[in-house]
Amino acid sequence: MKIAIATFQGLPDGDEDAPALIAELAARGVEARTVPWDDADADWDGFDLVVARNTWDYTERLAEFLAWAGKLPRLANRAEVLAWNTDKRYLRELAEAGVPVVPTLWDPAELPEWPDYVIKPAVSAGARDTARWSAAEAVPARAHLDRLLAEGRTVMVQPYLDAIDTAGESALVFIDGEFSHAARKEPILRPGAGVSELNGGTISPREPSQAELAIARRVLQAAPDGLLYARVDLIPGPDGAPVLLELELSEPYLFLHQAPGAAGRLADAIVRRSSSG
């Protein structure tokens, strides 16, 4: 059995979780290796399963990336899921389905009258082209909004929820539909500036609350089915109840090293997928 862990040219060996996952697969008699998704020499048909993991340059080459995904006969998560999830307009669908989502304005003509807010494109990763602004920073905020709109990008404007400064984000990871582990992500947006690096901010293990688990399961019930992995990012809403910030199904960092046994659980799920064809 051969598995490809799809990454990108800037990270040819995958993220820091890749060695543990490859080792766990090897312990199960499975040969696995990292392969950049745009490797012209890769024989994708020679793998029993391709697992999309660190394909972090897709935001600059989305059409090309989705075309690649659509040609693969055995991909997890599947190509239809990637197409849906790489554009954050999926949040609008989830909100319409009754999932509590951070309030969002889409392509607004005017800036909101919120004390602090976040402007970001609907296709982005690692806080690229994302920034937090205050009401007093209307001029640079307007310039940020206008630039993204002029580039033909769908723009999201969301209130900055202050509870994140103390509670952080809760990232709940599910493998094959079952809760595996969770991590706490420190806030990464400073007033007036985003971050340029991927996965900025300190990460630590977290035990999710029952309310967070309940919301995460509601999110997954409204999402596409058959997911190998999913990461549900929650933050406290204005009333303290958790709300969805993002649902990561395309290439999320899964924090496997934060939870004993997590790499093994993912390896088991990959083996099951590969064995079932």
Image: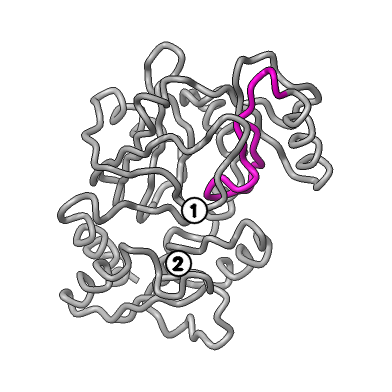
In this image, 221 relative to 80: left or right?
left
The amino acid type found where label 1 is placed reads Leu
User: Residue 173: x percent and y percent?
Assistant: 31, 45
Residue at image location 26% in from the left, 59% down from the top: 266
In this image, 122 relative to 73: left or right?
right
**Quick check: 78 above or below 107?**
below
Which of the two discs, 2 and 1, labels the residue nearer the N terminus?
2
The amino acid type found where label 2 is placed reads Leu
Residue beneath label 1, please?
198
Residue at image location 45% in from the left, 66% down from the top: 75
* Element under disc 1: loop
Labels 2 & 1 near each other (Cβ < 8 A): no
The residue lying furthest to the right in this view is: 150
**Label 2 crowding class (10 Å Cα cut-off): few <14, some 14-19, many 20+?**
many
User: Residue 135: x percent and y percent?
Assistant: 67, 18
Magenta-highlighted residues? 119-137
User: Residue 270: x percent and y percent?
Assistant: 29, 65
**Label 1 crowding class (10 Å Cα cut-off): few <14, some 14-19, many 20+?**
few
The residue lying furthest to the top in this view is: 239
Disc 2 to disc 1, C-alpha distance: 24 Å
What colour scheme has been applied to the protein in the rendered image?
Answer: one colour
Which quadrant is the C terminus positioned in?
bottom left
Residue 172 is covered by the magenta coloring: no
Residue 130 is covered by the magenta coloring: yes
In this image, 105 relative to 184: left or right?
right
Q: Nearer the viewer, residue 135 or 46?
A: 135
Disc tally is 2
Location of residue 186 (image quadrant): top left
Which mark, residue 75?
2
Location of residue 116 (image quadrant): top right
* Element under disc 2: strand
User: Residue 262: x percent and y percent?
Assistant: 21, 55
